[in-house]
Image (cartoon, helix red, strand yellow):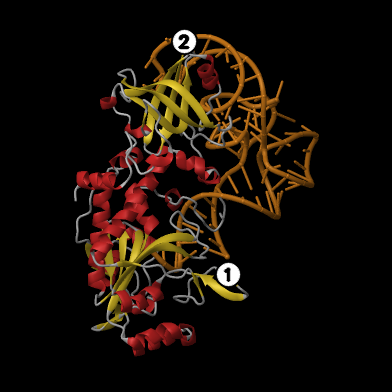
RNA sequence: GCCUGGGUAGUAUAGCCAGGUCUAGUAUCGGCGGCUGUCGCCCGCCGGACCCGGGUUCAAAUCCCGGCCCAGGCGCCA
């Protein structure tokens, strides 16, 4: 379905009233002679229509007899012009008391306005302050003065009202939808796994401990074991959900609560799920380009759809390239951030690194039958940013028990999980993708906090 | 956990190295007044700040010590 078709389908599914063609239409009644419309939908073609708008005051430019206000809702901005000449006392009083970010309703007439940069405006007739905002705001939503990340996050709701920030999350909404659309199209079933768990999934990583009715419990760092078990029920599952890492990392790409897109598929190996992954990423880009051009423009992003299949290099080849680039590395260690930055000089877009040493991968990763020193594993990279990792999983119960032992994990902690392998566990594979990191790539943001509504990091628990 | 850098009005910054000329400059913001086409409106007047504690000194925003807070990076990872 192309853009037109999809938009038409969406419109036909929701309530539509007047020009307020959006699912929020029921929020306020239309009034006699006025059609409800959203700010971003005020266009020259609507010249002469009498409309009522609801939103927030983005800016006020008071010229004395003329008052320009820029009205904002999540669809965009619209200029409304009021004249004090001939205004009744109610309108004059309302105009005198306006503050930025107040919620208002405005009644007026759309008119083509060559004098205005937008080319169209609403000639205001009446304005009602629905909820007044205080005069002194913590910082400027119009962005005239920059704000530090700390200030922005301390006043996150105001910060999110900035069109550029709203745009990020409108794009994220499309990405969620595109991911679900693509995976369902591939036969995947959406599931939800527990976020409060009794034992660590993979051993080492730091978990948040919680008091669970007096017992020790942890916040889940991954749905790994549950999703593997679930392939014996649904064959193909996916989950989009929050996960938690208590790592004391302090970088622009780490937070302690993040959103993971996870899939797991029975009767597939790593090659199969890599194809699902690159197909999904390509589909996400396609949908964003079709539906979020306005938001991409606001962000100053010119997005190009990636070509599939993505480039694939093995771990061994990566080491060889590092040596050629003058940064040799001995076999067996994980690729570290500086290594990935060097590799990014050669690999500019999306690419896979495959066949990592088995020893540095979690216990559930399948060793390559032809060379057990390496595993059927992969990472999806964008330049030097790790977006996803996955691989073929071990399906043989004996091998799984052996790998648990080798990694120094307590088999007792995993007995419920290992038991499933005795009930017919097929070959299976999967991956986990950092949703916010994908949004960083699409929106070209360099700090993951920009793409999370209320980020949680080592030093931030509020708001 | 380790390394580096930083805290000046509501916001963002100048000043700090080379202490005094700082009753701390600028922009934005808020208040008041003016303006009929603004769109980072403009013009005038007014308002508001040196993170906390200790020390050095005739003199501290500036130098030293301690604390608290923040940013970035590393390891680890999505």
Whichever of labels 2 and 1 marks the residue nearer the N terminus, that label is: 2
Please give the residue where the numbered disc 2 appears in the rendered image: A86
Q: Which mark is residue A210?
A: 1
Q: Which mark is residue A230?
A: none
Q: Position of residue A78 (x, y in %)?
A: 38, 29
Q: Quadrant of residue A229?
A: bottom left
Residue toward you, A292 or A310:
A292
Pointer 1 chain? A
Q: Position of residue A104 (x, y in %)?
A: 48, 30
The CA span between labels 2 and 1 is 65 Å
Q: Quadrant of residue A83?
A: top left
Pointer 2 chain? A
Query: In the structure shown, which secondary structural element does the residue marked by tag 2 occupy?
Result: loop
Residue shown at 34% from the left, 47% from the top? A171
Residue shown at 36% from the left, 52% from the top? A439
Tell me the mark number nearer the camera, choosing from 2 and 1. 2
Residue A441 visible in the snapshot: yes
Q: Position of residue A344 (x, y in %)?
A: 30, 57
Residue shown at 31% from the left, 61% from the top? A381
Above or below: residue A201 compared with residue B22: below
User: Badges 2 and 1: C-beta atoms under 8 Å apart?
Assistant: no
């Amino acid at each position: 379905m192309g853009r037109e078709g999809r938009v038409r389908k969406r419109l036909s599914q929701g309530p539509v009233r007047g020009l307020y063609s959006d699912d929020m239409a029921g929020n306020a009644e239309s009034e006699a002679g006025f059609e409800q419309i959203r700010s971003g939908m005020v266009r020259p073609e609507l010249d002469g229509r009498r409309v009522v708008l609801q939103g927030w005051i983005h800016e006020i430019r008071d010229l004395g007899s003329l008052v320009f206000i820029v009205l904002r809702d999540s669809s965009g901005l619209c200029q409304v012009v009021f004249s004090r000449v001939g205004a009744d006392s109610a309108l004059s009083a309302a105009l005198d008391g306006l503050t930025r970010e107040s919620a208002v309703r405005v009644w007026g007439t759309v008119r083509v306005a060559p004098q205005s940069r937008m080319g169209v405006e609403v000639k205001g007739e009446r304005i009602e302050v629905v909820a007044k905002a205080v005069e002194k705001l913590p910082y400027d939503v119009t962005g005239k003065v920059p704000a530090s990340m700390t200030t922005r996050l301390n006043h996150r709701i105001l910060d999110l009202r900035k069109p550029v920030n709203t745009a990020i999350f409108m794009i994220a909404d499309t990405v969620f939808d595109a991911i679900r659309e693509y995976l369902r199209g591939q036969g995947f079933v959406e599931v939800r796994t527990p976020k409060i768990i009794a034992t660590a999934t993979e051993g080492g990583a730091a978990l948040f401990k919680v008091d669970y009715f007096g017992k020790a419990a942890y916040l889940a760092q991954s749905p790994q074991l549950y999703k593997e078990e679930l392939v014996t029920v649904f064959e193909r599952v996916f989950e989009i959900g929050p996960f938690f890492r208590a790592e004391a990392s302090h970088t622009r790409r780490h937070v302690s609560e993040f959103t993971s897109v996870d899939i797991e598929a029975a009767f597939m190996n790593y090659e199969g799920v890599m194809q699902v992954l690159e197909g999904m990423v390509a589909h996400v880009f396609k949908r964003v380009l079709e539906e979020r051009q306005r938001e991409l423009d606001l962000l100053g992003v010119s997005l190009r759809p990636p070509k599939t299949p993505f480039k694939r290099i093995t771990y061994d080849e990566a080491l060889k390239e590092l040596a050629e680039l003058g940064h040799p590395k001995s076999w067996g260690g994980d690729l570290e951030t500086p290594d990935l930055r060097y590799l990014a000089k050669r690999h500019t877009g999306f690419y896979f690194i495959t066949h990592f040493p088995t020893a540095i991968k979690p216990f559930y990763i399948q060793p390559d039958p032809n060379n057990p020193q390496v595993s059927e594993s992969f990472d999806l990279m964008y330049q030097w940013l790790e977006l996803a990792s996955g691989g073929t999983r071990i399906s043989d119960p004996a091998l799984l028990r052996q790998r648990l032992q080798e990694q120094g994990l307590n088999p007792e902690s995993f007995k419920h999980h290992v038991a499933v392998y005795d009930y017919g566990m097929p070959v299976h594979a999967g991956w986990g993708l950092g949703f916010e990191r994908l949004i960083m790539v699409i929106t070209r943001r360099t700090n993951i906090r920009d793409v999370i509504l209320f980020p949680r990091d080592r030093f931030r628990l509020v708001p």
